[in-house]
Structure formats: structure tokens, C-alpha cells
Image (cartoon, rainbow, N blue to C red):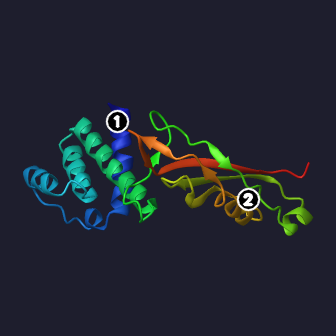
């Protein structure tokens, strides 16, 4: 139970810094009011955090942890929705489990930047790429940077093409991690 309490306290501290209404103390007084709010607006992260605070105050740590988990799920869902291409209207799904990684059908090698060659810079750039329903890369962002190589890696990855990922026979956008290796040999 001590480990659960520590984890709940840490997450609550982080929540206080991330959600303005939570930090400002604008918390409705009753658990009943908060549950009614959630029933009408299940995407309100601050309501989950407010409930978690009430549960911690009442030493109901398992319920507090459950509310924090729900808040995190909503945050992840909102984050994924912001990465979704506007044209599909569907948030991309993360590759893994039942969602199979698409097969690359067009590979474009990066152009090694001259300044990186001159400086002897090599390494691996890791990115998170959104693959649209048609198999094209619709977005990519750097997760692990090698500053002189990042732009070349992005330029190459944005030209890659993949087989469409199907879910129940329908093409869907997916998010996956990709790497670009730069080696001087």
C-alpha cells in the first residue's frame, strides 16, 4: 500500500502543475457532483483529478489510482487525436498487439548533410511517424535527436510509403516508431 500511496502522491503533484483548475483549488465539494460531471463530460481530465484528490484525502488509494489512470487515458487519447490527419477524422492507432506494423514499400535513404560529414557526426535518429490510411507518412516528430542529422532523417522518412494498415478490413492511420541510422563507415 505504501508504494501505491507514493505513486498516487507523485501523480497528484504532477497533476497540480498541469491542470490549472486543479491547482487553483476550484474543486466542487462532493464526490457525487464530480461523478455527475463525469457522466456528462467523460473527457474532462480535471474532474478525474479532482476525484483522485478526494479519494486520497479519504485514504481510498485504489480508487484514486483508478481515477488517475482514467485521466491519463483521456490525455493520451487527446494527444493521439492531435496527431491524426484532419482528412481521415480518425485518431491514429499505435502499432502493437492486434495492430500490425505496416510493411515499408518505398524506402528513401537520407542525404548525409555535408556539415555532419565534415564534423564526423554519426548516430541514430528515432522518430514517431503517423502513417495515413493510404500508407503515406502524414506526420513525423523526433524522439531522439542528433541535431546535425535530424532534418535529413525527417526529409527521408516523409517520403517513405507503407502498405495500408487494415482494421476489420478498413484502412486506418497508425503511429509507429522508426529509426534512421547515419554511419560514416
Question: In the depicted view, which residue is nearer to us: 42 or 63?
Answer: 42
Q: What's the residue at 35%, 49% (across, down)?
A: 72
Question: What is the x, y in percent for residue 29?
Answer: 10, 58
In the picture, the quarter occupied by the N terminus is top left
Question: What is the x, y in percent for residue 61?
Answer: 25, 38
Name the residue at the front extreme. Answer: 169
Q: What's the residue at 18%, 58% (across, down)?
A: 41
Q: Secondary structure at mark 1?
A: helix
Report the residue marked by disc 1. 4
Residue 95 disc label: none
49 sits left or right of 110 in the view: left
Question: In the depicted view, which residue is nearer to us: 83 or 87?
Answer: 87
Q: What's the residue at 58%, 60% (across, down)?
A: 141
Name the residue at the top extreme. Answer: 1
Q: What's the residue at 44%, 52% (across, down)?
A: 92
Residue 146 disc label: 2
Question: In the depicted view, which residue is nearer to us: 83 or 72?
Answer: 83
77 sits left or right of 99 in the view: left
Amino acid at each position: 500500500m505504501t508504494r501505491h500511496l507514493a505513486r498516487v502522491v507523485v501523480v497528484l503533484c504532477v497533476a497540480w502543475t498541469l491542470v490549472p483548475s486543479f491547482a487553483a483549488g476550484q474543486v466542487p465539494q462532493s464526490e457525487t457532483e464530480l461523478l455527475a460531471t463525469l457522466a456528462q463530460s467523460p473527457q474532462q481530465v480535471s474532474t478525474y483529478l479532482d476525484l483522485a484528490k478526494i479519494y486520497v484525502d479519504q485514504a481510498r488509494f485504489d480508487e484514486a489510482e483508478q481515477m488517475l489512470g482514467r485521466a491519463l487515458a483521456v490525455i493520451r487519447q487527446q494527444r493521439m487525436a492531435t496527431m491524426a490527419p484532419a482528412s481521415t477524422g480518425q485518431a491514429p492507432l499505435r502499432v502493437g498487439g492486434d495492430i500490425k506494423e505496416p510493411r515499408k514499400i518505398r524506402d528513401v535513404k537520407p542525404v548525409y548533410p555535408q556539415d555532419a560529414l565534415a564534423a564526423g557526426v554519426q548516430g541514430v535518429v528515432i522518430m514517431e511517424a503517423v502513417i495515413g490510411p493510404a500508407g503515406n507518412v502524414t506526420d513525423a516528430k523526433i524522439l531522439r535527436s542528433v541535431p546535425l542529422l535530424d532534418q535529413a532523417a525527417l526529409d527521408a522518412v516523409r517520403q517513405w510509403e507503407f502498405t495500408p494498415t487494415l482494421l476489420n478490413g478498413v484502412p486506418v492511420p497508425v503511429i509507429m516508431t522508426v529509426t534512421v541510422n547515419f554511419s560514416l563507415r
